[in-house]
Amino acid sequence: MRHLIDPMDLSVEDIDRLLDRADDIAKNPEKYQEVCKHKKLATLFFEPSTRTRLSFEAAMLELGGSVLGFSSADSSSASKGESVADTARVIECYADIIAMRHPKEGAPYVASQYVNIPVINAGDGGHNHPTQTLTDLLTIRREKGRLSNFTIGFCGDLKFGRTVHSLIKALSRYEGINYILISPEELQIPEYLKKDVFEKKGITFTEVDKMEDVMPQLDILYMTRVQRERFFNEADYVRLKDSYILDMDKLKIAKKDLSILHPLPRVNEISVKVDNDPRACYFKQVLNGKHVRMALIMELLGVSADEH
Amino acid sequence: MRHLIDPMDLSVEDIDRLLDRADDIAKNPEKYQEVCKHKKLATLFFEPSTRTRLSFEAAMLELGGSVLGFSSADSSSASKGESVADTARVIECYADIIAMRHPKEGAPYVASQYVNIPVINAGDGGHNHPTQTLTDLLTIRREKGRLSNFTIGFCGDLKFGRTVHSLIKALSRYEGINYILISPEELQIPEYLKKDVFEKKGITFTEVDKMEDVMPQLDILYMTRVQRERFFNEADYVRLKDSYILDMDKLKIAKKDLSILHPLPRVNEISVKVDNDPRACYFKQVLNGKHVRMALIMELLGVSADEH
Amino acid sequence: MRHLIDPMDLSVEDIDRLLDRADDIAKNPEKYQEVCKHKKLATLFFEPSTRTRLSFEAAMLELGGSVLGFSSADSSSASKGESVADTARVIECYADIIAMRHPKEGAPYVASQYVNIPVINAGDGGHNHPTQTLTDLLTIRREKGRLSNFTIGFCGDLKFGRTVHSLIKALSRYEGINYILISPEELQIPEYLKKDVFEKKGITFTEVDKMEDVMPQLDILYMTRVQRERFFNEADYVRLKDSYILDMDKLKIAKKDLSILHPLPRVNEISVKVDNDPRACYFKQVLNGKHVRMALIMELLGVSADEH
């Protein structure tokens, strides 16, 4: 592994190794606090994403490394017409590893073709966001103790939500997972996922349009937001909108050990009352995201805690 | 003390302790240059304030810590509709302490209610800016050797100037201070300050509309800017504007040991000729601000120089 | 040397010393990785320039120092009407050395007059950009082993290209250099350069309008971009534009050891096919720029590797 562009670049073994390391980092942070000393991470954010950028920066700082970069395209050379390939080759002279966010799909991949330092895709358009997928996997494993044999519900906009698509693809390699897809009809997962992932692997799945109907079955509930403008007609929106808002009422019929995930930022699709329920895992997810990015940076830089 | 939201959260003893530590930091900077090693400060600036942000960042770096954050709301998740509470809970996973600037009054307080790491209010709307008040107090103590028994003039826009309000409230707890308030009538200090602070504590004060009339009495002159658009009518503005501009001429009748303070940035309310006068303290104030922020960060993180 | 404002502030001896140190840094990076520990660089970029800013930041980080600052004027106090002199005096309290980029010519010079810490001009309007000149000189010396006795072609917009003007002035102090100036007539180098530099020193030069005509003679080709809007008439533009685009075809008649330089960012004036030719030096230039900035920061801060 030299770069991380697509979550499917990672084998099941790669994932196990990264999650194991993330767990060790959480347990023994002092062991890791100098492992990236004198290493530099460049955060090249051609579109803003505070949460993701700061997660990478915190990760690098907690490994003892340092950080440089930019947080939006206006302050980058892109505004002068420079290609992504050229920017990457310039940054290669300044840093040891790159985390790149770009509105254009494929930009981090292009960058990775031109440089001799590792490139991490920190989100490219509606395409991939592999460290979010790693974060989700780590959260599931930390909460459930395993990555197989559970019922997971994906709720909200399943058509455009790239985090959902990536997580489904990643989970499709594990056994005994029961998928329940909760969305309005017009926001169901894309056909290619049904055919190329579910059908091809013989995985069954259920599609429903109301959270309430399936809540008692779920071990994991992965929430995303449904934007009003994504509905085809106002009548549907009015009829369904409350079905995609998680509140304490809907949680009454849920399992006691349900794990609620959300990639954040959350607007109103999860009531703030839920935050204090022990089943809410979305802020723990943030911490998990930092740990798994630390593990990933170490992996790609080829550093280990033992040498230190 | 867990957070610093309002300057009045600080007792006189808290202030003494912070200013003493700031003085020791100024005298022995090497003693402190590793005390915050492996600690991270998040500077969450929902509105830009270069001076304040860089003061916090310099403070943290000189304590051996590191810094991450954002310098304006456009590059933050706020633009995606995330609440301050959620942003704070996310940042809690990335940093050990937060300095937050926000255009909305109360935002840093809200943040402090949701996280287990210290939050410093770095300015919330027209409300509070407690580290500016600490900076002013440190400057007075460094210049005068005491926080009591002097005549202080506040000059300029006393109605909207939050630094003036906070400093008056903070000083009201010390003895023997003579207050002279120099402003156009429409920009006098708010009634609540007159009633709740001055009257309640039996403190007398004088209101005048010309700097020249009181200059010889002042031990300290705290300058702020009067913006043209704040005047009720143009005639008043033309008649009075020069009375709120400090120049060498007006200084002729001032005490030899007058201390001139200004929260900066200065536009034209102090002539640049004054900068070289030994009575000008406003650039020293900047340095003092860094020292007192270093002391505050240490206090809130519970670190001391002795353990190192 | 206290500041670096104009490349001509540097004597030939200064340049030799800086380039020697840059070479040693490239050879022995570990020797230098702590020399600026506890020192802070302020990058004050009143206009964005990602490449230059990140080069300075990488340089400081690789010397073990740390960095603070801003990357555009909107996030600085300048937007509140503060003068450059005041901003500099404030930053002096926060940092040990300043790198300033400013759209107004002379701004870094003004700053340098008000502070007791070194100021580096990181580009002031169309005026000076001394660290680019140092980068170019280091690149020539690294590629050719000398700063004299070669034929150099400058190609493109020679009228407005400040990097070209500065490099010509810097090179005019070395012996045996043959200058070939390749540009459309309306974009020839300014008269003052012809008179004050070339004529005064008795240096001969050739002006041509097509790269192809002189390619076989060149030891060094310094490329810059010609912007369409700089041409006086469309006919000239159409006739000449291809003459200012370097591609593999034009390189066929070039020397085997030609060195191609470009200050970057490159848009389309050099074909990407050229990037893989060993004669392309423009990405090496980026690395050289970091090394020479490291040398410069050390020089101005008065630190050396030997004390460490």
Image (cartoon, coloured by chain):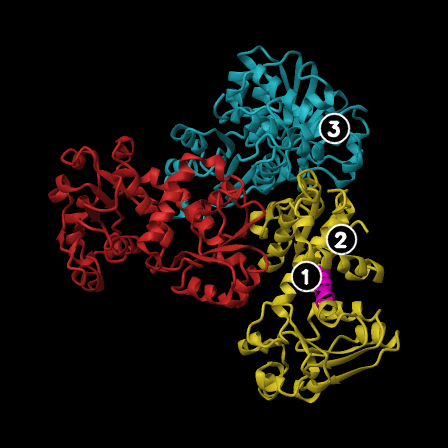
Chain colours: A red, B cyan, C yellow
Secondary structure of residue under mark 1: loop
Callouts 3 and 2 on one subunit: no
Residue A116 picture location, percent across and down: 52, 62
Of tags 3 and 2, the one toward the viewer is 2
**C277 left or right of B272?**
left
Residue C148, numbered circle: none
Residue A243 sits above or below residue A202 on the image:
above
Residue B137 picture location, percent across and down: 64, 23
Neighbourhood count class around disc 3 (C-alpha, 10 Å): few under 14, some 14–19, many 20 upward: some
Residue placed at 62% from the left, 38% from the top?
B58
The residue singled out by tag 1 in the image is C125
The one nearer the camera, C134 or C203, is C134
Pointer 2 indicates a residue of which chain?
C
Residue B212, numbered circle: 3
Magenta range = C127-139
Neighbourhood count class around disc 2 (C-alpha, 10 Å): few under 14, some 14–19, many 20 upward: many
Residue C110 picture location, percent across and down: 75, 50
Identified by mark 2, the residue type is Tyr
Identified by mark 3, the residue type is Glu
Residue C109, numbered circle: 2
Callouts 1 and 2 on one subunit: yes
The Cα–Cα distance between marks 1 and 2, rounded to whole angstroms, is: 12 Å
